[in-house]
Image (spheres, rainbow, N blue to C red):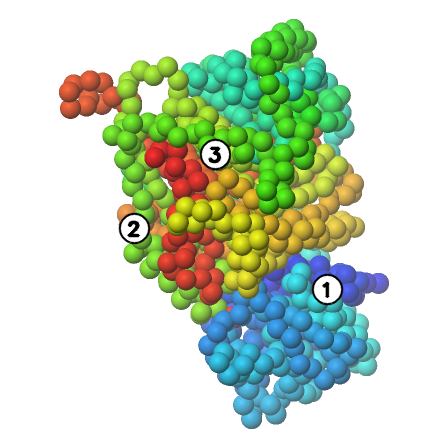
């Protein structure tokens, strides 16, 4: 029978990586609990069912009871109840503290940085050569005579006298079966010899257990799969479903802007498009077609029990749900399950299904973090904004911007007439254009050797005219002093060990004063311009339920295909392309900047966090290991205004899980908000950021990040999904200013307030001025359309 290891998680964003490493190296069953899930007596009761304990990393300090919960009691168990323990980072520091060591602060904190560890090859370092290990810590164990009487130091690292001098990296208890390491064996950048300590620990631990003849008991009754590990649907997958009616044709000359105008975007009250205007990640343009009496928009606001459903072209709303364990998420899963479709073209990524956005705040409450109060709309007296706003499309048009293939599709029964009619219209439109707009892969190679989408090359020189007269535009940017103070406030938390990285953001507002009547909708006017100005693989326009979102995001959050292959592409590390003197940063210069410890550490922390999120759903469920791997570590990608450091993490949801009813949505809702917008560990970082970014009464972010920092994408009836991080984007609430005003001369005017968020990851290595500049760089990629 497999042995059982209990992993005690201190709300870290790396603990699932540790669980996966333990599972791989020990073949034991790993059960995870949180530090404060159980009282000590309950814990002691079920400990008999486990063979060993691993205590994970975490934010805060071992001297603070709330940060460690049950941990100190584990090291203080009566001897007859003791089992082997392996402590990592916070778990290690707690071990040292429990036996008399002091806990101090590092002079120079180490977050996401590697060190070579000096060890004597014995004990848990048996057979290890050079251990090159990743560290995430602000605190250190300070040994003294008392502690050294109880604990033996197994490894150290030398940070040099200018920094922290010698820092203890591993200890073991002289009598009891307790071991601990300060570094992170589970980080993807710790080398194999660094991870081998877990294998060695397990050998020593099982030796100890065998020596004592300790055999664990059966799991207590009722110890089952924790509710949060069940799937949204709660029932196994159903096969079959509606047949899709579709046509595919080649239209390499089809212009996306013209296609949108064919669909009447200029005056549309509702619109949904996911667009790829740069082709080096995104590829498809997906349009949802609103159908009167059929198309439903689902909205939900944090705190609401029910989900509101509004049918296009009908007045009133229905309220659904309220009695499922996952609330709105289950409602979406139920809707989707009722629609499983068959017979679409395997090459089309979207056959119909949900498109829309999910706010940052929806993700925050998923972490059990209460929202800052009041929220922006409560303060402004606006309509309550939905935190989830997605529309279920039966009719759709998909364009492959590389091959020139176009699909017109419908899930409606007997809808051939619409499909044929629409296909004819689109073909005619394409026939009227003269030049191909699709770019065969690798056709245009930029001077730096990277493939640039042709649109990128074409537009830099052509767009000069301002979109709105300067007198119609009023921009309110965050204050520099305040932003820089916030950077320092973040760094203070990093120095205390509360977080390893914090993605600080602030919002800018743009107030437009516009004529009452205009020929085309402002959102469309802006989108068209932005599409040229800042082509992006995850661009898009979404208008529904009182909110308009215009995106030109470079960052994929999460995608999955119909076979259960998942991909995340976090971006961390940004270099502005234009220099202050007007010259352009070359790719090799960008490489030099992005290859520094600061930028690499920023990226690595998020890669490890994303691995954790993905492991959390995909690994150790049923008989599957999730196959989580980093397929690209810190590649450099070039965009219109910036170079970015991008990593790719992949995983797999196998047949068993999918058969049980798990879908990509299970992964999505449990991985929100995107880690690249929070920092690590996610939960503590989100709490800290709420404090620092402020409430509607005082902060630049108006008490909420709202659509910014959320996700925008689709979940298709074919089983695939793709969601981007909402950055380099803008959004507005349609009723923010009411509908009309009088200007000075008595003419009727209209006002619109657009909101643009921007920010960047703050680490211990950041400098406040640099962070301010980085925020402005990101802001300007979209703000520039108003200037
Ligand atoms: C916060 C933003 O971007 C995030 C922060 C990045 C960084 O710190 O380098 C890069 C991409 C995004 O994950 C933004 O664009 O506003
Ligand atoms: N990774 C960790 O467990 C960090 C522990 C502690 N919060 C520190 O910063 O030192």
Does residue 567 appear left or right of residue 590 in this picture? right
Position of 131 relative to 245 (above/below) = below
Res. 460 mark: 3
Q: Quadrant of the N terminus?
A: bottom right
Looking at marks 3 and 1 on the same chain, the residue that comes earlier in the sequence is marked by 1
Disc 2 is placed on an element classified as loop
- The residue at label 1 has a CB less than 8 Å from ligand 2: no
Does residue 408 appear left or right of residue 653 in this picture? left
**Residue occupying image coordinates x 48% and y 46%:** 584
Q: Are marks 3 and 1 in contact (CB under 8 Å)?
A: no
- Which numbered disc, 3 or 2, marks the residue closer to the eye? 3
Q: Which residue is mark 1?
A: 22
Does residue 640 appear left or right of residue 123 in this picture? left
Query: Residue 276 or 650: which is nearer the viewer?
Result: 276
Position of 714 relative to 644 (above/below) = above
Image spot of residue 468 (x, y percent): 33, 27
Q: Residue furthest right?
A: 1
Q: Residues within 10 Å of mark 1 (few under 14, many from 20)?
A: many
- Residue 731 location, quadrant: top left
Query: Residue 414 or 585: which is nearer the viewer?
Result: 585
Looking at marks 2 and 1 on the same chain, the residue that comes earlier in the sequence is marked by 1
Q: Which residue is mark 2?
A: 479
């Amino acid at each position: 029978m497999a042995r059982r290891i209990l992993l005690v998680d201190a709300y870290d964003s790396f603990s699932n990586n540790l669980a996966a490493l333990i599972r791989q190296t020990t073949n034991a069953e790993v059960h995870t609990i949180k530090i404060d899930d159980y009282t000590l007596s309950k814990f002691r009761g079920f400990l008999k069912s486990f063979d060993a304990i691993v205590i994970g990393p975490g934010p805060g300090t071992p001297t603070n009871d709330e940060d460690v919960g049950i941990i100190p009691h584990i090291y203080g168990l009566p001897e007859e109840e003791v089992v082997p323990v392996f402590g990592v980072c916070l778990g290690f520091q707690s071990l040292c503290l429990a036996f008399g060591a002091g806990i101090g602060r590092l002079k120079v904190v180490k977050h996401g940085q590697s060190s070579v560890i000096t060890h004597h090859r014995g004990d848990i370092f048996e057979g290890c050569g050079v251990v090159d290990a990743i560290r995430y810590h602000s605190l250190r164990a300070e040994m003294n005579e008392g502690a050294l009487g109880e604990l033996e130091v197994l490894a150290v690292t030398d940070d040099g006298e200018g920094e922290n001098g010698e820092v203890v990296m591993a200890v073991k208890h002289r009598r009891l079966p307790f071991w601990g390491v300060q570094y992170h064996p589970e980080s993807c950048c710790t080398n194999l010899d660094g991870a081998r300590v877990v294998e060695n620990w397990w050998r020593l631990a099982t030796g100890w257990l065998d020596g004592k003849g300790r055999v664990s008991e059966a799991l207590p009754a009722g110890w089952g799969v924790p509710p949060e590990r069940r799937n949204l649907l709660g029932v196994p997958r159903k096969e079959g479903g509606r047949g899709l009616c579709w046509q595919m044709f080649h239209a390499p000359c089809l212009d996306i802007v013209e296609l949108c105008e064919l669909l009447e975007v200029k005056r549309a009250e509702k619109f949904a498009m996911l667009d790829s205007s740069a082709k080096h990640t995104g590829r498809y343009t997906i349009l949802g077609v609103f159908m009167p009496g059929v198309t439903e928009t689902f909205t939900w606001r944090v705190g609401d029990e029910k989900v509101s459903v509004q049918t296009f072209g009908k007045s009133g709303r229905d309220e659904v749900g309220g009695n499922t364990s996952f609330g709105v998420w289950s409602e979406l899963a139920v809707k989707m399950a009722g629609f499983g479709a068959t017979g679409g073209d395997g090459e089309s990524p979207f056959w119909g299904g949900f498109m829309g956005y999910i706010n940052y705040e929806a993700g925050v409450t998923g972490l059990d973090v209460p929202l800052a109060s009041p929220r922006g709309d409560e303060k402004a007296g606006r309509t309550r904004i939905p935190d989830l706003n997605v529309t279920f499309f039966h009719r759709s048009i998909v364009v492959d911007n590389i091959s020139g293939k176009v699909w017109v599709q419908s899930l409606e029964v007997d809808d051939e007439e619409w499909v044929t009619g629409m296909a004819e219209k689109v073909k005619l439109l394409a026939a009227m254009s003269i030049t191909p707009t699709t770019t065969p892969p690798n056709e245009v190679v930029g001077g730096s050797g990277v493939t640039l989408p042709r649109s990128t090359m074409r537009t830099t020189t052509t767009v000069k005219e301002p979109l709105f007269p300067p007198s119609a535009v009023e921009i309110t940017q965050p204050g520099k002093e305040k932003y820089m103070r916030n950077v320092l406030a973040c760094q203070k938390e990093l120095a205390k060990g509360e977080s390893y990285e914090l993605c600080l953001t602030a919002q800018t507002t743009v107030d437009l004063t516009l004529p009452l009547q205009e020929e085309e909708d402002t959102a469309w006017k802006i989108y068209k311009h932005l599409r040229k100005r800042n082509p992006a693989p995850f661009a898009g326009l979404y208008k529904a339920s009182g909110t308009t979102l215009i995106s030109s995001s470079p960052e994929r959050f999460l995608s999955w295909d119909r076979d259960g292959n998942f991909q995340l592409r976090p971006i961390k590390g940004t270099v502005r392309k234009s220099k202050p003197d007007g010259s352009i940063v070359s790719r090799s210069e960008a490489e030099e900047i992005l290859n520094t410890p600061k930028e690499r550490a920023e990226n690595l922390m998020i890669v490890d966090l994303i691995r954790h999120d993905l492991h959390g759903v995909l690994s150790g469920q049923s008989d599957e290991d999730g196959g989580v791997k980093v397929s690209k570590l810190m590649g450099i990608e070039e965009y219109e205004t910036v170079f970015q450091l991008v990593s790719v993490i992949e995983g797999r949801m196998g047949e068993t899980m999918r058969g049980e009813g798990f879908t990509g949505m299970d992964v999505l809702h449990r991985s929100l908000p995107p880690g690249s917008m929070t920092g690590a560990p996610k939960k503590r970082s989100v709490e800290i950021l709420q404090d620092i970014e402020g409430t509607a009464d005082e902060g630049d972010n108006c008490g909420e990040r709202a659509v910014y920092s959320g996700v925008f994408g689709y979940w298709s009836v074919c089983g695939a999904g793709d969601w981007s991080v909402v950055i380099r984007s803008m959004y507005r609430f349609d009723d923010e200013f009411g509908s009309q005003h009088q200007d000075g001369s008595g003419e009727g005017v209209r006002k619109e307030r657009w909101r643009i968020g921007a920010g960047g990851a703050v680490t211990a290595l950041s400098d406040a001025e640099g962070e301010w500049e980085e925020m402005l760089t990101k802001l300007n990629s979209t703000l520039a359309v108003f200037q």
